[in-house]
Amino acid sequence: VQPPARRRPPRALLGGLLIGLGLAGTSPASAQLVTRVTAPGGTSGISARDYVDRVVTTSPDLERARALALAAEARIDEARILPSPHLRGGLGVIDVSGARAPTETFVALSMPVDYSGRTGTRVDAAFAEREIARAELVAAERELRVVALALYVNALAAAAQAATLASEV
């Protein structure tokens, strides 16, 4: 069983694509990709690096991931402090005698007891949450960069194809 034959693009399209992408040099080993787009009218566009950086800096999804990473960092400090004591007060009616005893006032102070290394466990969990948030931020940024670069390359290919078709007409 032979593998299916690969369909090759027409030479004119391939040549236009290479010219449109700005490949220079006589051999494939010496070819360099110029990442600045020049429109057929001579207007210069944005470079791939600038485009990807702009997408990354203006992405609301990445802003959310950055905020989650900062919040995870703050939870480490929160986990290090001991739980706060609670002060409660109020009025209560206790009538054990059945003789209509007066209303009783009470005040209660409670302090949570941190036993058996719970603070250390909370801090370790907060560190783990921070590492997860950082990893998710890095992964989201990497994925966004790949998508933005793919869209940029697709735009280059479309511009090259349009230039080739325009030159054939």
Image (spheres, grey):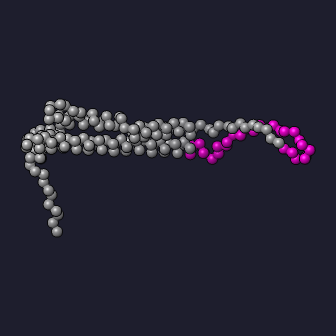
Question: Is residue 147 rendered to the left or right of residue 156?
Answer: right
In the image, 55 versus 86, the foreground residue is: 55
Instruction: Report the magenta stretch's main SS.
Output: loop
Relative image position of residue 151 (x, y in whole percent): 26, 43
| Residue at position x 37%, y 38% in the image | 59
The image position of residue 140, as x and y in percent, is 37, 43
Which residue is found at the position 22% from the left and 41% from the top?
Answer: 155
Looking at the picture, tell me which residue is in the foreground, 123 or 149. Answer: 149
Q: Is residue 18 visible?
A: no
Q: List x then y, in percent, for residue 142.
A: 34, 43
95 within the magenta span? yes
- Residue 87 lies in the magenta-colored region: no
* Residue 52 figure quarter: top left
Q: Residue at x 15, y 31 (%)?
A: 42
Give the residue furthest to the bottom.
1
Q: Nearer the viewer, residue 24 or 105?
A: 105
Q: Is residue 62 left or right of residue 153?
A: right
- Name which quarter of the figure residue 113 lies in: top right
Relative horizontal placement of residue 44, taking residue 135 as reference (left or right):
left
Q: For the magenta stretch, what is the residue range?
A: 94-121
In the displayed structure image, the side of residue 12 where residue 68 appears, left or right: right
| Coordinates of residue 41 in the picture (x, y in percent) | 14, 32
Query: In this view of the protein, which residue sits in the foreground, 94 or 79?
Result: 94
**Numbered label tally:** 0
The quarter in which the N terminus is drawn is bottom left
Q: Where, quadrant-wise, is the C terminus in this rendering?
A: top left
| Residue at the (24%, 37%) spot, across then down | 48
**Residue situated furthest top in the rendering:** 43
Residue farthest to the front, as pictured: 169
User: Can residue 45 be seen here?
Assistant: yes
